[in-house]
Image (cartoon, grey):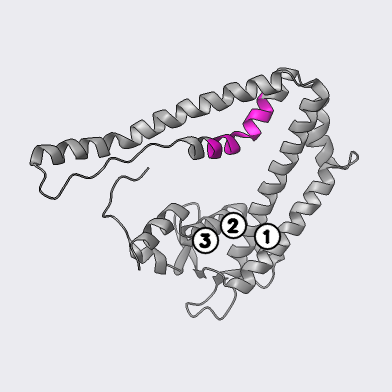
Amino acid sequence: MDIEKNDVDLSKLFLWNKEVEIKDEAGNVVKTVWMRLVGDADLNRARVISLRESAKARESLKTETSDEYMAYIAPLKFSSKENITAGIKLLNMGNYMDEARANVITKFPVEPASDASLEEQEKYQKIIDDFPIKWEKDLDKELKKIDKRESSRLDVMDEDALKKEYVDGLINYICQTSMNDTFHSYCTYFGTYEDAKFRRKAFRSYDDYSNISPRVKQMLEDAYRDLEIPIPQLKKSLGATP
């Protein structure tokens, strides 16, 4: 949690393009490209394509003769109940965290009056500084409650029901990952140019982009992520604007 109240950087709202240097393993610049956030049309194209890829992955994972099924689902028959239970918890960890955050209500301390003494202001600042620690402790306590509840729920389930819940969760996780990766990859492809005026695409086709070295591809996708405004920072910035 960010406890600073005066560190809003509005420039992040306007950082929508930048120059990106592609370097070799020795750190030498071998090529320069320009990158910008994609517009609504390309954003929608990336979304549609990523949903299609997710659907393909889901179909493969549900087809018992597919390589994906054999790699991810088939080995389940050799897993113990304890391992399946642990797998379900791991797959649901994000949901548990969301639930815990929603349940934790830690009241923010009231700011002292403008004429408060220096000592009162010092005490208030100490409370502010310790607030994230208190919030983390409350969150950890809530997570332990959720874990105990889930352990009890899963413990009374028979093995077939456990396997079904695990498989459903695993398929959703793999498909979500596939969708996210594809979406971000296409956004990077759509948003990368050879010139600073954004007139010439850096890659003639997505196949050309896909066939570059994994290291360069990762470099470009990391650069595109840097252009995206983190949600907490965006909310904070918008809070400082009319």
Distance from disc 3 to disc 2, alpha carbons, whole Å, reads 11 Å
Figure quadrant of residue 204: bottom right
Residue found 84% across the figure and 48% down from its top: 59
Q: Residues within 10 Å of mark 2 (few under 14, many from 20)?
A: some
Q: CA distance from mark 1 to mark 2?
A: 8 Å
Q: Secondary structure at mark 3?
A: helix
What residue do we see at 55% from left, 37% from top? 99
* Residue type indicated by callout 1: Ser
Mark 2 and mark 1 in contact (Cβ < 8 Å)? Answer: yes
Q: Is residue 113 above or below residue 200?
A: above
Q: Secondary structure at mark 1?
A: helix
Q: Which residue is mark 2?
A: 217
Picture coordinates of residue 201, whole percent (x, y): 60, 75
**Mark with earlier residue (1, 2):** 1
Q: Quadrant of the C terminus?
A: bottom left
Q: Earlier in the sequence, mark 1 or mark 3?
A: 1
Front residue of this view, candidates 237 and 77: 237
Q: Amino acid at mark 2?
A: Lys
Per the image, the residue denoted by label 3 is 224
**Dot 1 surroundings within 10 Å: few (below 14), some, or many (20 or more)?**
some
- Nearer-the-camera pick, 23 or 119: 119
92 inside magenta stretch: yes
Around disc 3, counting alpha carbons within 10 Å, would you say few (fewer than 14), some (14 to 19), or many (20 or more)? many
Image quarter for residue 130?
top left
151 relative to 43, above or below: above
Q: Which mark is residue 210?
A: 1
Q: Specify the segment rendered in magenta.
A: 86-99
Overall secondary structure of the magenta section? helix
Say above or below: 178 vs 173: below
Residue 193 as seen in the image, left or right of residue 1: right
